[in-house]
């Protein structure tokens, strides 16, 4: 990458960082492009050279956020074999990310869920598909009883994940973190209980 491209990339990252910080504290609606520019140390024209609209910045932040989580899940699934370890690992990774990012404005939380499309054109349902795949693999290896419907198991895990996002948006990240602590055990117990 030449000097111009490096500078352009750093400028774009400063805008992304400023947008994240401002949206997280103030929400999307109350955050103005001029405030993002001031925080990033760029001119308004520079902002619009990188992002045609504020919504494009939100979309990029959502995609980046979801891609990071997808990469974490992918790495976890490739290094663990038991279904319980995968589920526990996913929710522990979510907890770690939540602790690191702290409180987040409810409007921005929902903007991340919806406008970022979570790494696919199908919206947040890519996570549902991942959880269903984990359930199918759990059934095929005997971790989950064969009589279980993988779509139902995957939907239950997805539902818990999605509910955590609502909890985080409306009750705060500390409440969601408390709920997250019980997630792996709850899901594992539900799967194990179905074997009896």
Image (tube, rainbow, N blue to C red):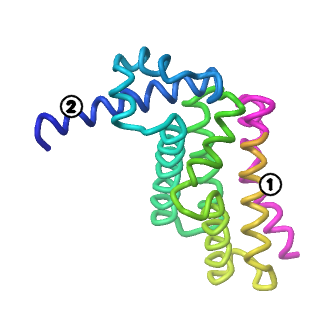
- In the depicted structure, whether residue 101 falls above or below residue 80: above
Q: Which circle marks residue 186 in the picture?
A: 1
Under circle 1, the secondary element is helix
Residue 87 image offset from top left, x and y in percent: 65, 59
Q: Is residue 184 left or right of residue 16?
A: right
Q: Does residue 32 show up magenta in the picture? A: no
Query: For the magenta stretch, what is the residue range?
Result: 167-196
The spot of residue 118 in percent (x, y) is 56, 54
- Which image quadrant: the C terminus? bottom right
Q: Residue at x 40, y 28 (%)?
A: 15
Q: Name the chief secondary structure element in magenta.
A: helix
In percent of width and height, residue 114 lies at 65, 49
Which quadrant would residue 106 be assigned to in this image?
top right
Q: Residue at x 74, y 60 (%)?
A: 157
Residue 44: x, y in percent? 39, 23
The crowd level at tag 2 (other Cα within 10 Å; few <14, some 14-19, many 20+) is: few
How far apart in space, not on screen, are marks 2 and 1 (Cα)?
48 Å
- What residue does disc 2 label? 7
Task: Give 10 or 143, whichever is nearer the viewer.
Answer: 10
179 or 3, nearer to the observer? 3
Q: Which residue sits at x=64%, y=84%?
A: 140
Q: Is residue 127 above or below residue 40?
A: below
């Amino acid at each position: 990458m030449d000097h111009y491209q490096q500078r352009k990339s750093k400028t774009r990252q400063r805008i992304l960082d400023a947008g994240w910080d401002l949206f997280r504290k103030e929400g999307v609606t109350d955050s103005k492009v001029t405030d993002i520019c001031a925080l990033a140390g760029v001119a308004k024209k520079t902002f619009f050279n990188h992002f045609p609209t504020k919504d494009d910045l939100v979309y990029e932040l959502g995609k980046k956020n979801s891609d990071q989580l997808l990469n974490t899940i992918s790495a976890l699934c490739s290094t663990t074999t038991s279904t319980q370890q995968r589920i526990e690992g996913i929710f522990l990774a979510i907890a770690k990310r939540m602790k690191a990012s702290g409180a987040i404005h409810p409007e921005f939380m929902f903007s991340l869920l919806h406008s970022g499309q979570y790494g696919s054109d199908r919206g947040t349902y890519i996570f549902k598909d991942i959880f269903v795949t984990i359930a199918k693999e759990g059934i095929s290896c005997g971790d989950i009883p064969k009589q279980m419907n993988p779509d139902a198991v995957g939907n239950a895990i997805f539902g818990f994940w999605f509910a955590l996002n609502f909890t985080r948006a409306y009750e705060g990240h500390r409440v969601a973190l408390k709920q997250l602590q019980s997630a792996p055990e709850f899901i594992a117990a539900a799967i194990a209980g179905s074997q009896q």
